[in-house]
Amino acid sequence: MKEPVAAKRKLLVRPVSAQRLAEPAGWAIFVLAALWLIFLGSTFDQYIGGLAVIYAISALGLDWIQGRAGQVSIGNAAFMAVGAYATATAVKWHVPTLPALLIACAAGAVVGLIFGLPALRLQHLYLALSTLALQFIVQSASLQYETSTQNYAGFSVPAPSIGPLVLSGRSLVFALVIVLALTVIVQRNLFRRAPGRAWMAIRENQMAAAVIGIDVTRWKLSAFTASSALISLSGGLLAYYTLRVFDDTYTLAFALTFVAMVIVGGLGSIAGAIIGATLITIAPYVLSSWTNNLPSTVPFASWLSSNISYINNGLYGVILLLFLLYQPRGIAGALAAGGRSIAARLGPPAQGSRAAAGAQAAPAVAADVTSRSSVTVSPDQTMAGQDHPRDEARQVLVVRDLKLVYRTGAQALSGVDIEVDAGEIVAILGRNGAGKTSTLRSVSGFFRTDRARVSGSVMFDGREIGGASPIATSGRGVVLVQERDKVFPSLTVAEHFRLIRCSAEARAEAEEIFPPLQTRASSPAGLLSGGERQMLALALAWSMQPRLLLVDELSLGLAPGVAKRLISSLREYRDRTRVPILLVEQNVAAALDVADRIYIMEAGRVVHSADAGEVSRDTVLSLSFGQR
Amino acid sequence: MSSSVLGSLISNTLVLGSMYALVGIGFVILFRSTGVVNFAQGSLMVLAAYLLYTCADAFHLPLWICFMISVVAIGILGGLFYLGMFRRMVGADLFVTVIATLGLSVVVQMITIMIWGAQVRPMPELPSGKPVFSIGPIPFTAVDLTAIILSAVLIVILEVGLRRTVLGIATRAVADSSHLAALMKVRVHAISATAWAVSAMCAGVAGCVLSLIVGSVDPVSIGQLGLLVFPVVIIGGVDSINGALIGGILIAAIQNLVQYYLGGNWVDPIAYAALLVMLLVRPRGLLGSRAVTRI
C-alpha cells in the first residue's frame, strides 16, 4: 500500500508545477514566434506578421470592453479610423511619430468617452448600437474630411521614425512587437489588480457591484475610454504601417473581424486576443496559398481559386460561427480546459477533492441524531433502512446515484437516490444549497445551453429520462412548477389557459378551487400577487394532466393562510387524481402535513428518508437544519 | 419647397417608411419571441433581391411569382437558421446571439457574392412610374400603392395574429420564458423557427420591393438599408410593433428631408445620430416597454 500512496503524492505535486510552468511557457512561444518573425521571416511574412501585431493591439482593446466589461462593441473600425485620421492630421503639422501616436490615443479617448455615455446606464445591446452609429458617423465624416481637404485618394503618411532612426521592415516589426508587449504588460497588471476586479464584478452583476461600493459609472467609462484609446493607437500604427489613410479601410466588416478575433481567441484572455488576431489575420493568406497549390485534378479546384477572394472576405465570419457553435470559449478556453484535463489525469482535481470534503461533512451532520440516519448515505443502505420494502411495480420515479455539475463547475448533486410511488406525495427537505431544486430540475431536464452535466439514472415509468431536455420530459408527463418563473408575466390569466389548450370544464374546475383566477382572468400574470401566481401555476399544471407533478417551494414567500390553502388543495388534488407529487419545501411543518414520505438533503446527497408520520418536526429540523 | 416636391417627398416617405416598418416588425417579432437581436436582416434582404432577379432573369416567370418564390425561400432559410444554429443557443446570453447574427450576416453576404458575383444586376422592369392616384398634391404610382398596401396588410396580419391566435400567445409565452414554455409543452423550437421564418420573410419582402424600386441589386447597398432597422426600432421601441411602424415612417421622413436639404452624404449619419439621441434621451423608445432597457 505504501508505494501507490507515494506515487500519488508525487502526482499531486506535478500538476501544480505544470500549471505554474504553463503560463511562462505559453508566453515563451509568443516571444519565439516574434523573434522568428523579426530575424528569420521573409519580407512577406514580416508584413503579415506586422499586421497581425497591430490587429492584436486593436483586439486587446476590444477585449477590454467585450471580455472584461461584458459589452458587445462593433466600433473597432471607427476608433481605428479616428486614430488613423488623427495621425494623418498630426503628420501634416509635422508632428513626430511618438507624439502623433499619443494624439491618436487622446482622440480615441475623447470619442470613446462621448460614445460610452449612452451605454453607461444600459447594458449589452446599447453599446453595440451606439458603436454601430459611431461606425456610420465616422465613415461619413472621414469621407467628407477627405473631400473637403481634396485628398480624394486618402492621406499619405511618411514612414515612422524615432529621432533620426527611420523604422521600416525588420526594425518596424520589432517596434510593433515592443508596443504589443508593453500593452500586454500594462493590461496584465491592470486586470490582476483592483481595476480588473471592479470590471469583472460589473460584468458579472452590475447591481451587486454597485451595492458593494464599486462606482459602476466611473469604471465602465474608464474601461471604455482606455480601450478606445488603445484601439485608436492601433489605428495610428496602421496608418504608419501602410503609409496611407483611406476611408474604405475602416468598414463595418473590418470592425467585425475584431469581434471574430476576440471570440475565436477566447473572451477575457490576453493570450486569446493575440492568438485570435493572428489566426484571423493569416487565415486568408494561408487559404490562398493552399488553393493556389492545389493540383487541378482536385474537384472544385478552379472554382475555388476563382472565388478565393470572395471566400477570404467572409472567412472570418465562417471561423467565427464555427467557434460560436462548437468552441464558444475560444482557443484560450479550449487550451485551459485541455490543460485542466491533463492535470486531472495526472492527479486528483481540485474540484473532486472539494466535493469529497462536502460529502464527508454530510454524514457528520447526520451522525449525531438518530442511529438510522447515520447509515443512509449509500443507495443500498437507503434501501435497507426502509421499514417496508418498496413495491417496484408501483414506482413512478426512481432516481439512482444522480450527480449534477453546473457549468460553473459547482457540484450540486453528488449521488442522490429517490423514489416516488404511484399516488404518493413525497417532500424533499433541507437547507438552502442542499440540492433540492437541483434534484427537481435534473428530473425535469436541462437545455443544452444550461451546460449542466447530469449522470446517474432517472427512471420515469420504467423509462430512462436522465439528461433529456424539458421538452422531452414534459412530453412524457413530467410537469414542473418552478420556484420562480412559474407564469408568463406578459400573458393574461385567460391567455395562459388558451396557451395550454385547457378545456372549459377543467378551467371552470380550477376557477372553483381558486376564485381569483376568475376575477383576474384578463389581468397580465406579471401583475398577480405571489399567492395568485402560485394558484395559476398549480391550476395550469393540473390542466396539463401530469403523470408526475414536481413542485418547487410551494409555500415560500406566501402569507401563512394562503400557503395553508394551497397545500391542502395539493393534497385534495392528489386524492382526486392519484397523481404522484414530488415537492420541495422549506416549511417543515407544511411538508410533514402534506407528504406521505420525506427525504432530507444535505450537501448534494440524501442523508435521511422516512415516512412523514413517523418523524417529529424536531427530528426533521435537527436533521436538515442542524438545529436542536 | 413647392407643393409638388412636398407631395413626392411625402409619397417617398410613405413607401420607404412602410418598408422600414416591415423590416422593423420582423426584427421586433424575432426579438420578442426568441430574444435574438438580428443583425443579419440586411443580408437576407440582399439575398431575397438576388433570388427575385434570378427567377425573373433565368426562368422568365411573372414578377409576382418571382416575388412569392423569393419571399418563401427566404422564410424557409430563416427557419433553417434557427433549426441549424440558433436552436443550440436557446437561453444563451444576448451577447452570444448578437455576435452570432453578425457572423451570420458576413457568411450570407459571402455566399451571395460567391453565387452572383459582385457586380450590379438589373431588376425586372416595373410598370410605368406614372402616378395613378393622388391625394391632394401627393402622387402615388401603382408600385407605391402596392408597396404601401402590402406592408399595411402584413403588419395588420402580424399584429392581430400575435395578439389573438393561440400561435401568437405561444410566441409571446416563448418570449417571456422559453424554459417555462417548454415545461408547459409549448413547442418552443417550432414556435421559434416560425418566428425566424416570419421575420426573414418581412426582410425578404422589403428587400425585393426596395430593389425593384431602385431598379438594380448589388451585394452591399440594400444590406446597408437593412442596418437602418436599428434606428427604426430604437426610436419606436425594440419590443413594439406599432413602435416599429412609427419609427419606420419617422426615419424615412428624416432621410427624405435630409436628402432634400443637405444631400445624400448626410442621410446615414443623421439617421444614426437620431439613434444616439434616442439612446440617451429615451432608451426604451417611443412605445417600448420599460423592461427592455434591461437588455
Image: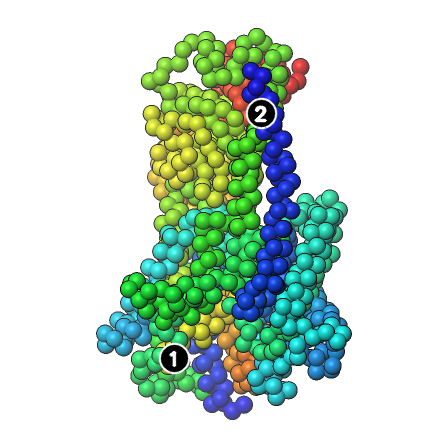
Quarter of the image with the C terminus of chain A is top right
Q: How is the image coloured?
A: rainbow
Q: Which residue is painted at 61% across and 88% down in the image?
A: A150
Q: Residue beneath label 1, please?
A: B120
Q: Which residue is painted at 56% across and 60% down in the image?
A: A277
Quarter of the image with the N terminus of chain A is top right
- Marks 1 and 2: which is nearer the front? 2
Q: Is residue A127 or residue A236 the one in the foreground?
A: A236
Q: Is residue A458 above or below residue A241?
A: above
Q: Position of residue A82 (x, y in %)?
A: 65, 72
Q: Is disc 1 surrounded by few (<14), some (14 to 19) or many (20+) residues within 10 Å?
A: few
The chain to which mark 2 is attached is A
Q: Is disc 2 surrounded by few (<14), some (14 to 19) or many (20+) residues within 10 Å?
A: some
| Callout 1 amino acid | Val
- The part of the image, by quadrant, that contains residue B275 is bottom right
Q: Is residue B293 or residue A324 the one in the foreground?
A: A324
- Asked whether residue A192 appears in the rendered view, the answer is yes
Q: Which residue is painted at 59% across and 52% down in the image?
A: A29
The circle on residue A8 is: 2
Q: Residue furthest front?
A: A40
Q: Quick check: A87 left or right of A566?
A: right
Q: Position of residue B197 (x, y in %)?
A: 37, 58
The chain to which mark 1 is attached is B
